[in-house]
């Protein structure tokens, strides 16, 4: 027999979801997550914004609103205090934009800087999203353009124009609040946010948890400016190869697709968009609402009956 705690744990780690969900009472659940990482940009304020937006995204991916956050900060002893202040200020700006509160946190000494948040949110127990409900006939909507892994790698190699870097930073620092709010007005069968495993990896987790196959259309991918050209030049972070090695046996690809285009599906994203599995009858309405705030939002595939592969890229 499950324990009392097991019965109230509505979503745990068994389905690779973005956060855990614990039922406090029949009409109220708490959603909790934690996420932190090393800098992806040089500017400490922007790094703080991106890391905070990334952590907050896990709450939005569960259909909830973030309420309370705690800072997680790792700093080298030699790092100037002003840099730490800028990182925390960037994080605070995004938590405030989300309508949440930072109530403290924890700092340790570490040779490499790291920053993120532990975040709690709340939702009605029956209105929480997960990645496990995708249904045959659903369409898949992605709310942010892909390519942040390619772009940040290119920036480290001084291959980006300033405008391209500015666009990538703006996308990574953008909250998924608007996407969550728009989607919450309709029917969402399943949702996840696209982060380190790339879109192929996170779609694979959704498809496996839902017992279906996700068909992704390569020509429908929304991309950051310059990402395609950089992909052709094989400017990818190391995480792309690890993702492809881990998920490749679960993903089928059409033989005539160029390798760089397939690789973009495995590009690890930082603070990526929401991936929503929604009824086909509601997809156009939701896409129109999303594109008013996020012009790059796009339908990138559909859900079919389960086949030999959880994901097919065509």
Image: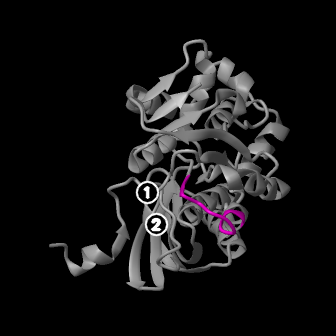
Sequence-first tag of 1 and 2: 1
- For the N terminus, the quadrant is bottom left
- For the C terminus, the quadrant is top right
Q: Secondary structure at mark 2?
A: strand
Residue 108's disc is none
Q: Position of residue 160 (x, y in %)?
A: 76, 32
Write down the residue under mark 2.
33
Q: Position of residue 17 (x, y in %)?
A: 43, 57
For the residues labelled 1 and 2, the Cα–Cα distance comes to 10 Å
Q: Is residue 170 above or below residue 177?
A: above
Contact between labelled residues 2 and 1, with CB atoms less than 8 Å apart: no
Choose between 70 and 82: the one closer to the eye: 70
Choose between 82 and 89: the one closer to the eye: 89
Choose between 203 and 87: the one closer to the eye: 203
Residue 191 among those drawn in magenta? yes
Write down the residue under mark 1.
17
Q: Position of residue 290 (x, y in %)?
A: 77, 56
Give left or right: position of 205 versus 263.
Answer: left
Q: Residue at x 46, y 40 (%)?
A: 204
Residue 74 among those drawn in magenta? no
Q: Secondary structure at mark 1?
A: loop
Q: Nearer the viewer, mark 1 or mark 2?
A: 1
> Can you see residue 43?
no
Give left or right: position of 262 versus 99.
Answer: left
Give left or right: position of 142 versus 208.
Answer: right
Read off the magenta span: 182-192
Q: Residue at x 59, y 40 (%)?
A: 302
Choose between 280 and 224: the one closer to the eye: 280
Q: Is residue 235 above or below residue 302?
A: above
């Amino acid at each position: 027999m499950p324990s009392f705690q097991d019965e109230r744990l509505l979503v745990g780690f068994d389905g690779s979801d973005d956060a855990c969900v614990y039922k406090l009472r029949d009409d109220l659940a708490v959603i909790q997550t934690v996420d932190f990482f090393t800098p992806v940009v040089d500017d400490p304020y922007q790094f703080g914004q991106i890391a905070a937006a990334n952590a907050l995204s896990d709450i939005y991916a569960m259909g909830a609103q973030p309420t309370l956050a705690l800072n997680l900060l790792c700093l080298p002893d030699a790092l100037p205090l002003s840099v730490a202040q800028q990182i925390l200020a960037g994080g605070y700006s995004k938590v405030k934009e989300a309508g949440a509160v930072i109530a403290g946190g924890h700092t340790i000494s570490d040779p490499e800087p790291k920053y993120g948040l532990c975040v709690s949110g709340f939702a009605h127990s029956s209105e929480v999203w997960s990645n496990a409900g995708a249904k045959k006939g659903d369409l898949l909507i992605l709310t942010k353009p892909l390519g942040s892994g390619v772009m940040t790698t290119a920036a480290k190699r001084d291959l980006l124009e300033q405008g391209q870097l500015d666009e990538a930073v703006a996308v990574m620092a953008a909250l998924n609040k608007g996407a969550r709010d728009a989607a919450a007005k309709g029917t969402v069968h399943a949702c996840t946010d696209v982060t380190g495993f790339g879109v192929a990896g996170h779609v694979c987790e959704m498809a496996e948890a839902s017992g279906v196959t996700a068909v992704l259309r390569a020509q429908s991918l929304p991309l950051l400016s310059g990402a395609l050209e950089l992909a052709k030049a094989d400017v990818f972070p190391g995480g792309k190869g690890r993702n492809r090695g881990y998920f490749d046996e679960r993903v089928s690809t059409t033989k005539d697709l160029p390798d760089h285009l397939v690789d973009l599906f495995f590009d690890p994203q930082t603070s990526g968009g929401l991936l929503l599995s929604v009824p086909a009858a509601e997809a156009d309405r939701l896409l129109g609402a999303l594109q008013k705030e996020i012009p790059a939002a796009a339908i990138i595939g559909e859900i079919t009956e389960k086949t030999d592969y959880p994901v097919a890229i065509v």
